[in-house]
């Protein structure tokens, strides 16, 4: 097996791996980069948070304006508050302004949690526009604006002692900006298309270049040779996936007045009214795992199909139909009760990770485990087909020898 892998390393589909890296990079960076930053005139309240500096100035302006509007020593109430609420609001703002200026964002997070929790079970408690903007901008991924949903990112940051504000880096930080592109299905689907091409060309390589007879001289079973092809292919595919993300984040961070941001801020989602949070690095890890279990399944299927399909175009076509049946409208032909067992269902990564629409009852570990089962089944069928073919050959040879 080791020798077979070493042999396959000499001819991996590295060209397609580099193509996948480039395509993945472009899919992430083109919509994320602010090619023409809009000048910001804060005197006229024209906010455009596209840089590190403008985001910091924007948040500071919100807080300072709130501190000017409300006062801890106010003698007159500000609508819709009474005098006690106005003073309480002012104390929150005063604490936040001082903490923000010295870079103590955890204190700002704690004050926002307190403000949202004061006598409120649902809905936005602070009607002040500046604070509403700060809270809502900080968790733009969540559509349900309940008090619990609004508090969730701040509670996560405080609980994990991450000195960040969700709104800072939302558009100027590479971690948040690139992950926002990964939350869409485009990158996932593009890399799956590259994977289909890599597998289709790899498992028909012997039939295409006429080296099938030579490969049979290697003292390894056909199944081990097939797995040996998968190892370098998987390495190049992961180089494309991980390399595209790292390259996009680096390029973004090197853009004028941008930075790397943070992967420690949370991704928030709502499941049946319950609010969940995961760090962005966990989100990236789940996407990476999903692509790898897809690779494991499709490689087994590609090898199984290559026993009958010898041409690269034919094998790539069949793999593409299996993978993109949802996008082609073919998944609707399968009864709803059986769709959980159709691989094409698992190409909508945002819904899969946030447990939305048809994934409300499937946790990430459940569909990951199910997909591993798909892979084991595909490789098991391939092994069974090899055994059946070799068994028939041995019986045929035995019958001829007896004759």
Image: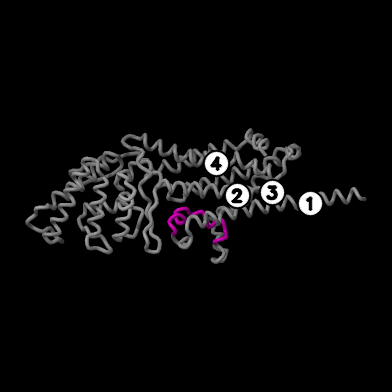
Q: Residues within 10 Å of mark 2 (few under 14, many from 20)?
A: many
Of pointers 1 and 3, the one earlier in the residue sequence: 3
Of pointers 4 and 1, the one earlier in the residue sequence: 4
Circle 4 SS class: helix
Between the residue at mark 2 and the residue at mark 3, the CA separation in whole angstroms equals: 15 Å
Query: Which circle, 2 or 3, is nearer the viewer?
Result: 2
Give the magenta part as a residue range.
340-355
Q: Is residue 345 magenta?
A: yes
Q: Nearer the viewer, residue 197 or 109?
A: 109
Q: Is residue 59 magenta?
A: no
Q: Position of residue 382 (x, y in %)?
A: 68, 51
Q: Name the residue beneath numbered marker 2.
A: 298
Q: Name the residue beneath numbered marker 1.
A: 391
Between the residue at mark 1 and the residue at mark 2, the CA separation in whole angstroms equals: 26 Å
Q: Name the residue beneath numbered marker 3.
A: 309
Between the residue at mark 2 and the residue at mark 4, the CA separation in whole angstroms equals: 13 Å
In the rendered image of this protein, does residue 17 appear above or below residue 131? above
Between the residue at mark 3 and the residue at mark 4, the CA separation in whole angstroms equals: 23 Å
Between the residue at mark 4 and the residue at mark 1, the CA separation in whole angstroms equals: 35 Å
- Disc sitting over residue 237 in the figure: 4
Between the residue at mark 1 and the residue at mark 3, the CA separation in whole angstroms equals: 21 Å
């Amino acid at each position: 097996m080791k020798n077979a892998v070493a042999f396959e390393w000499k001819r991996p589909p590295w060209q397609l791996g580099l193509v996948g890296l480039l395509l993945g990079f472009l899919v992430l960076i083109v919509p994320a980069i602010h090619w023409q930053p809009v000048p910001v005139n804060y005197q006229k309240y024209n906010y455009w948070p596209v840089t590190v500096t403008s985001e910091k100035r924007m948040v500071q302006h919100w807080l300072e304006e709130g501190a000017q509007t409300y006062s801890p020593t106010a003698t007159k109430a500000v609508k819709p508050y009474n005098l006690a609420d106005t003073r309480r609001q002012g104390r929150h703002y005063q604490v936040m302004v001082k903490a923000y200026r010295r870079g103590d964002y955890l204190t700002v997070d704690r004050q926002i949690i307190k403000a949202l929790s004061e006598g409120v079970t649902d809905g936005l408690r602070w009607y002040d526009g500046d604070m509403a903007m700060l809270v809502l901008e900080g968790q733009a991924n969540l559509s349900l604006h309940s008090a619990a949903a609004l508090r969730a990112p701040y509670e996560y940051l405080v609980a994990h002692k991450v000195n960040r504000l969700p709104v800072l880096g939302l558009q100027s930080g590479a971690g948040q900006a690139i992950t926002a592109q990964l939350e869409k299905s485009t990158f996932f689907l593009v890399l799956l298309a590259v994977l289909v091409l890599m597998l289709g060309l790899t498992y028909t390589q012997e039939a295409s270049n006429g080296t099938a007879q030579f490969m049979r001289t290697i003292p390894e079973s056909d199944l081990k040779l097939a797995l040996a092809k998968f190892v370098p292919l998987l390495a190049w595919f992961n180089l494309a996936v991980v390399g595209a993300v790292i390259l996009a984040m680096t390029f973004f961070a090197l853009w004028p007045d941008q930075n790397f941001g943070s992967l420690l801020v949370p991704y928030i989602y709502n499941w049946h009214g319950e609010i969940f949070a995961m760090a962005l690095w966990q989100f990236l890890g789940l996407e990476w795992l999903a692509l790898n279990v897809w690779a494991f399944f499709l490689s087994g299927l590609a090898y199984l199909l290559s026993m009958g399909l010898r041409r690269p175009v034919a094998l790539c076509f069949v793999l593409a139909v299996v993978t993109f049946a949802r996008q082609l409208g073919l998944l609707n032909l399968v009864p709803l009760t059986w769709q959980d067992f159709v691989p094409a269902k698992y190409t909508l990564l945002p819904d899969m990770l946030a447990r939305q629409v048809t994934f409300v009852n499937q946790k990430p570990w459940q569909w990951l485990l199910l997909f591993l089962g798909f892979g084991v089944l595909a490789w098991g069928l391939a092994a069974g087909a090899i055994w059946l073919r070799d068994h028939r050959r041995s019986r045929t040879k035995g019958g001829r020898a007896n004759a």
